[in-house]
Image (cartoon, grey):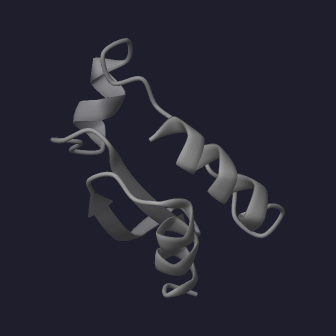
């Protein structure tokens, strides 16, 4: 999913910042955010999670999903 993620990030900046978490390296952070499957997209606004989507997505789908949650 990395290429799709990079492409979507390019379309969403500067309005939305995408970040990746290596849950194998940082297991505590993965547990803190209850990440159960990889990949998982979580959308935060004002420090609170407002949406979550498990599974791989194409760049256009990532952008569309993000914009559905203003």
Outermost residue toward the left in this view: 36
Q: Position of residue 10 (x, y in %)?
A: 77, 55
Count of numbered marks: 0
Q: Is residue 54 left or right of residue 14?
A: left
In the picture shown, does residue 19 fall above or below 41? Answer: above
Closer to us: 2 or 44: 2
Residue at image position (29%, 32%) is 30
Placement of the C terminus among the 4 image quadrants: bottom right
Q: Position of residue 48 (x, y in %)?
A: 45, 66
Q: Position of residue 16 (x, y in %)?
A: 70, 64
Outermost residue toward the right in this view: 14
Tell me the quarter of the picture where residue 26 sits. top left
Q: Is residue 7 left or right of residue 44?
A: right
Residue at image position (58%, 72%) is 63
In the picture shown, does residue 62 fall above or below 7? Answer: below
Q: Is residue 28 left or right of residue 15?
A: left
Q: Is residue 49 left or right of residue 55?
A: right
Residue 19 visible to the viewer: no
Tell me the quarter of the picture where residue 22 sits. top left
Closer to us: 19 or 29: 19
Residue at image position (28%, 20%) is 27
Closer to us: 36 or 4: 4
Q: Position of residue 1 (x, y in %)?
A: 44, 41
Residue 9 visible to the viewer: yes
Tell me the quarter of the picture where residue 11 sits. bottom right
């Amino acid at each position: 999913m990395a290429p799709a993620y990079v492409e979507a990030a390019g379309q969403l900046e500067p309005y939305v910042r995408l970040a990746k978490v290596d849950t194998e390296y940082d297991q505590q952070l993965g547990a803190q955010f209850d990440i159960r499957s990889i990949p998982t997209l979580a959308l935060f606004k004002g420090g609170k999670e407002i949406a979550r989507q498990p599974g791989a997505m194409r760049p256009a789908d990532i952008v569309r999903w993000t914009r559905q949650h203003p």
